[in-house]
Amino acid sequence: MRITEIFHSIQGESTYAGLPCVFIRMTGCPLRCTWCDTTYAFYEGDELGLDEIVQRVRRYPCTLVELTGGEPLHDPEGLTLITRLLDEGYTVLVETSGVVDVRPVDPRAVLIMDIKCPGSGMADRMLWSNLSALKPGDEVKFVVKDRADYEWATDVLDRTALGDRYSVLFSPVFGELDPKTLAAWLLQDGVRARLQLQLHKLIWDPSARGV
């Protein structure tokens, strides 16, 4: 399978934020979000076998692994990799865009599903049936660009009651929406969601790779 990079860093997002984590960034994505910060993952990378990937992960003193991208479920081989890592005893997070069917994913993995808001330009690509495939322990994320995105996201929460079943994350688009503004909206409306900042971008250069 084609892998853009494998690196050891601090988890910057989700309820696992702050924990050491090994990231496997897979190459390829069917989406082109307007605010994407990993466009290099669309095309770059090397062809690696399953054993080589697992060997590289083993080099790090860490039991938390995240498959990201790109879109890690874009390549069907990603499903095999997820199961292999779980069988080896790793806690596996899968950050997915929500546009690829998640039902084939090993149920032991934790799904972190990004529901694309209109500001991404990709909201019409969402596979809404994925919401019924989520399980306890999975998480849902909204990346919010502006007030219109925020109102759209809260409407989704009102209609689906996702906040009653899963951890819901609201993340401002880095450099476009002030986190203080998003925090104020969440507090004012009593939204059942966690404000998420991209912790890694606050620690390291936001444009850096492999962090």
Image (cartoon, helix red, strand yellow):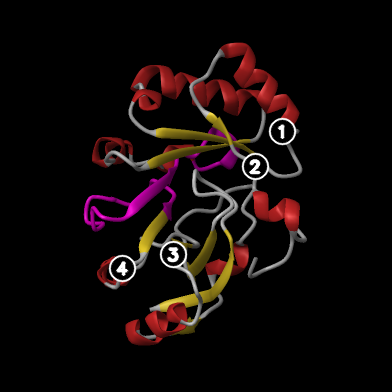
Residue 176 position (above or below residue 38): above
Residue 116 image point, x, y percent: 49, 39
Give the label on residue 89, or none. Answer: 4
Q: Secondary structure at mark 4?
A: loop
Image quadrant holding the C terminus, namely bottom right
**Quick check: marks 3 and 1 in contact, CB under 8 Å?**
no
Point out the tag, 2 or 1, that comes first from the N-terminus: 1
Give the residue at mark 1. 179
Front disc: 2 or 4: 4
Q: Whole-Å distance between the Cαs marked 3 and 1?
A: 27 Å
Q: Secondary structure at mark 3?
A: strand
Query: At label 3, which amino acid type do we have?
Result: Val
Residue 34 image point, x, y percent: 62, 47
* Structural crowding at the residue carrying mark 1, measured as other residues with C-alpha within 10 Å and reported as few (<14), some (14–19) or many (≥20): some
* Residue 199 as seen in the image, left or right of residue 70: right
Point out the tag, 2 or 4, that comes first from the N-terminus: 4
Q: Whole-Å distance between the Cαs marked 2 and 3?
A: 20 Å
Q: Secondary structure at mark 1?
A: helix
Magenta highlight range: 95-122
